Structure formats: structure tokens, C-alpha cells
Amino acid sequence: MRLSLDIAVWIPDDDSYAGRQVVEDPPDASTAVGAEAFRHSLWGSAATRELGATFLPQLADVTVENRGHLQVSPGQLDAFAQECALLTENVELLSAATGYDTERILRYLTNVREAVQRARAVQGGIIIW
């Protein structure tokens, strides 16, 4: 059982499981996106949704199909990056609404933005699981 959310970069590969090949992270990369509880209490919170976020709230919408994973395709990276920028700009509001420290939220959003940069470099996408 997974106790924390992690982000990974993937590239499309029709010969791989689920049509994607997960890329190995650089040794200095942080892949943490929060404790499992963040799925609902931060990324899926009313405050996050009210800001207009649509990608990260999907982590709270666990279905048989997505198994609780958020997969962002290469063509969706720009919109996803914009969502992360919006959340970064409103980190004080998110902190007040969720009770999480702003620095902690910013650290996870930084990890996400860095993964997006790595994904762009290989024409891939990201997955949070």
C-alpha cells in the first residue's frame, strides 16, 4: 500500500504496459507530491477546485479505470503547468483553507513543475500515483 503520492515522467510506447514507459528520474530529483491524505485534503479540496483546477483534483476521484492515478499526456502539459502556476500564485489561500504550511505546498508544486520540465525534454507526460 502506497503511503505517499509520487510523480513520474513517462513517454508513449505502444509496446509497454499501458502504452507508456516510465522514465528513470535523475538522482537529485524529488518526486514527492504529498502524503496519501493530500489526494483529498489538498489536491482534491474545495479550495483547489474553486480556483479552477481540473487536473490535480482528479487524484481524489479514484475510479476502477484510473486506480487513483493522474496521467497527463504530452499534449496536456501546458494546461497542467498553468494549473500548477495558478495554485502557486494562490498558495496562501490553499494554506489557509487546508491547514498545510505554504512552504510544504510550494515544495510539492516545485517537484511537479520540475517533472513537467523533464517530461517536455523527452516529449512525454507525467503520472502521479
Image: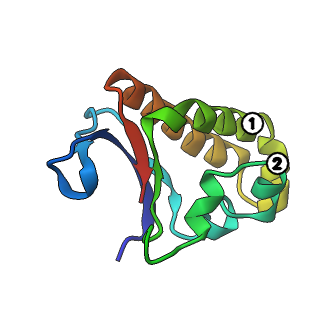
| Nearer-the-camera pick, 3 or 14 | 14
Q: Is residue 118 above or below residue 105?
A: above
Residue 20 is left or right of residue 92, and the answer is left
Q: Residue at x 65, y 47 (%)?
A: 105
Residue 19 is left or right of residue 39, and the answer is left
User: Mark 1: few, some, or many residues within 10 Å (few <14, many ≥20)?
Assistant: some
Task: Give me the C-alpha separation between circle 2 and circle 1.
Answer: 8 Å
Q: Does residue 30 appear anywhere in the picture? A: no
Amino acid, disc 2: Leu
Asked if labels 1 and 2 touch by Cβ distance under 8 angstroms, the answer is yes
Instruction: Give the number of the disc on residue 51.
Output: 2
- Residue found at the far top of this picture: 121
Q: Which residue is mark 1?
A: 86
- Residue found at the far left of this picture: 15
Q: Is residue 110 above or below residue 2?
A: above
Q: Percent from the top left, x then y, of residue 64?
A: 44, 78
Q: Is residue 97 above or below residue 16?
A: below
Q: Percent from the top left, x then y, of residue 40?
A: 64, 69
Q: Does residue 109 appear anywhere in the picture? A: yes
Q: Residue at x 73, y 41 (%)?
A: 87
Q: Is residue 40 above or below residue 109?
A: below
Q: Quadrant of residue 86?
A: top right
Q: Percent from the top left, x then y, of residue 16?
A: 17, 51
Q: Quadrant of residue 69?
A: bottom left
